[in-house]
Amino acid sequence: MQQLIEFASNNILLVSVLVVILLLLASTWILPRNAKPLSPMDAVRTASHEDALVLDLRSENEYQDGHILNSVNIPLGFLESRVSEIQEYKSSPVILVCRSGNRSLQAANMLKKQAFENLYNMTGGILAWKNANLPLESSS
């Protein structure tokens, strides 16, 4: 035990980094998530079998370059002012999609506050969709 205390006192920075990493890992297990992670293949199944809304949060230009068939485009910056357009899906599954998965996490926080109940974050976003060789529809 004395050696452990001596090691910790000689390596305060190293021990501090370890503690922070452990706290971050613990928070991912303990804190509730606003959106359940969903792979692209699971997103296909959920959209098909549960009649889910696929909400694309990318910019209009990104969306036009290629998007998931029948998805609805509301860029993240406009979501709060346009949430009324998707109110009917408050109790339905909503699959949130962006380029890589970051904007969709922000949208999940916003929609959870608006009482949306069944939110999914497509992990990896459209990039993961493309890597899975799934089809995209283009508006251009």
Image: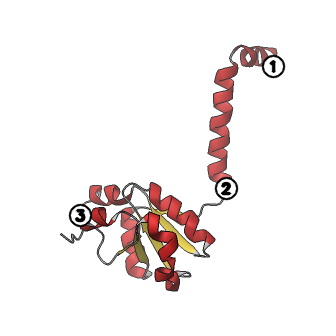
Q: Position of residue 47 (x, y in %)?
A: 39, 76
- Foreground of the two, 115 or 132: 115
Label 2 packing within 10 angstroms: few (<14), some (14-19), many (20+): few
Secondary element at tag 1: loop
> Which residue in the structure is indicated by mark 1?
1
Upstream in the sequence, badge 3 or badge 1? 1
For marks 1 and 2 on the same chain, the one whose residue lies earlier in the sequence: 1
Residue type (three-letter) at the residue carrying disc 3: Asp
Q: Which mark is residue 31?
A: 2
Residue 140 lies, in percent from the top left, at 18, 69
Q: Which residue is mark 3?
A: 65
Q: CA distance from mark 2 to mark 3?
A: 36 Å
Q: Foreground residue, 115 or 31?
A: 115
User: What amino acid is found at the position of numbered circle 1 in the picture?
Assistant: Met
Question: In the image, which is nearer the foreground, mark 3 or mark 1?
Answer: 3
Classify 10 Å Cα crowding around label 3: few (below 14), some (14-19), many (20 and above). Answer: few
Left or right of 52 in this view: 140? left
